[in-house]
Image (cartoon, rainbow, N blue to C red):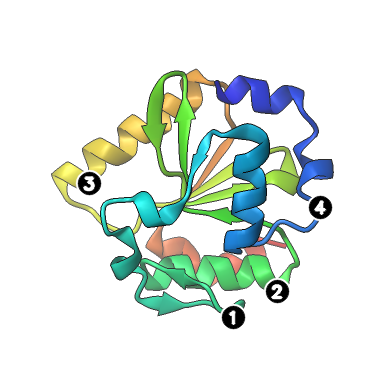
Amino acid sequence: MIKSFKKMNLLQTFKDVTNSVSKREEFNKRFCHFVPKPSWRGIEKNLKFMTMAGHGVQSEGERIIADRLYECEIDYIYDSLIEVNGEWIRPDFILPGLNDLILEYKGMDDPEYNEKFERKLQILADAGMKVMVLRPRDLERVKEIIV
């Protein structure tokens, strides 16, 4: 299903996309592939870190990435549930202005997390999506990576 997004000009649709609830609701009305956060199994309480744009994220690493995207004026959709080829996943950052690049932060290293993370990457790869993975060691160079 995500392939149908590629056929549409998301850059035009999302000229002003930010991490705001109103923009996400606007997107839901048009495409119905994103699920609004309040319906997600209590995920909101895990948003412990505040970005420069005033939005919550789940980790310090994601905050650093979100802040850099904000500084560079790169629009993003954070942690939204999407359906890709019949499977539901939550990419960390979708960058609609950059040809729908998916930016993933691999901030933990435990077997269960790694398995889920690799499965998400496989789903995205099978759908032909472009994915960039950042790890904790990349955060000190985030200003060189995201420009």
Badge 3 element: helix
Sooner in the amino-acid sequence: mark 2 or mark 4:
4
Residue where numbered disc 3 is placed: 113
Residue found 48% across the figure and 19% down from its top: 126
Badge 4 element: loop
Badge 1 element: loop
Q: Are marks 2 and 1 in contact (CB under 8 Å)?
A: yes
Disc 4 and disc 1: Cα gap in Å? 20 Å
Sooner in the amino-acid sequence: mark 3 or mark 2:
2
Sooner in the amino-acid sequence: mark 1 or mark 3:
1
Residue where numbered disc 4 is placed: 15
Sooner in the amino-acid sequence: mark 4 or mark 1:
4
Q: Is residue 82 visible?
A: yes
Badge 2 element: helix
Sooner in the amino-acid sequence: mark 4 or mark 3:
4
Disc 4 and disc 3: Cα gap in Å? 33 Å
Give the amino acid at mark 4: Lys
Disc 2 and disc 4: Cα gap in Å? 17 Å
Q: Are marks 4 and 1 in contact (CB under 8 Å)?
A: no
